[in-house]
Image (cartoon, helix red, strand yellow):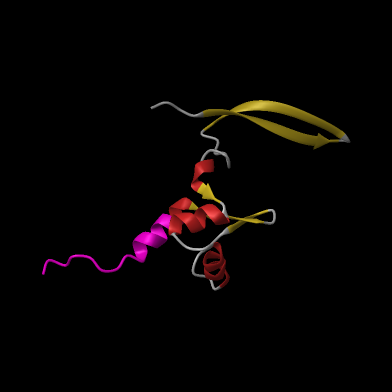
């Protein structure tokens, strides 16, 4: 199994002196590893086949969770997928 190695910059402040060093860290997670997994409001609404207003209302009443990035909402595609699976109704029951 191949290990993921990433260079990480570390900043240290000591006695009014700022130093920066770069180290290699194994399996260091990054916020930007799965950018395609985070959706904007418009993308999330399209994924759920809702209007953006309906999506915002569902967020407001707590039916869907979102994460704030500055002033913007971001939605986890995995959480939206799980929401769709959990809300699945109907289907063939063998009758």
Position of residue 57 measured from the top left corner of the image (x, y, whole percent): 55, 70
Q: From what the image shows, is residue 67 above or below residue 38?
A: below
Q: Is residue 82 magenta?
A: yes
Decide which of 80, 54 is in the foreground and name it. 54
Q: Residue at x 64, y 26 (%)?
A: 23
Decide which of 49, 10 is in the foreground and name it. 49
Position of residue 95 measured from the top left corner of the image (x, y, whole percent): 11, 69
Q: From what the image shows, is residue 41 above or below residue 1?
A: below
Position of residue 19 measured from the top left corner of the image (x, y, whole percent): 79, 29
Q: Quadrant of residue 28?
A: top right
From this viewpoint, which residue is outermost toward the left?
95
Q: Is residue 40 left or right of residue 84?
A: right
Position of residue 72 measured from the top left corner of the image (x, y, whole percent): 65, 55
Q: Residue at x 82, y 32 (%)?
A: 18
Q: Is residue 74 magenta?
A: no
Query: Number of numbered discs present?
Result: 0
Q: Is residue 36 left or right of residue 16?
A: left
Decide which of 52, 30 is in the foreground and name it. 52
Q: Residue at x 44, y 59 (%)?
A: 48
Magenta residues, start to end: 80-95
From this viewpoint, which residue is outermost toward the front?
51
Image quadrant in which the N terminus is located:
top left
From this viewpoint, which residue is outermost toward the bottom?
61
Q: Is residue 83 left or right of residue 19?
A: left
Q: From what the image shows, is residue 45 above or below residue 23?
A: below
Q: Quadrant of residue 14?
A: top right
């Amino acid at each position: 199994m191949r290990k993921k190695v990433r260079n990480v910059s570390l900043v240290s402040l000591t006695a009014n002196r700022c130093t920066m060093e770069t180290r290699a860290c194994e399996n260091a997670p990054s916020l930007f590893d799965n950018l395609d997994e985070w959706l904007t409001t418009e993308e999330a609404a399209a994924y759920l086949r809702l209007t953006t207003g309906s999506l915002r209302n569902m967020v407001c009443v707590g039916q869907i969770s979102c994460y704030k990035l500055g002033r913007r909402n971001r939605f986890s595609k995995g959480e939206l997928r799980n929401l769709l699976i959990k809300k699945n109704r109907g289907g063939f029951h063998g009758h």
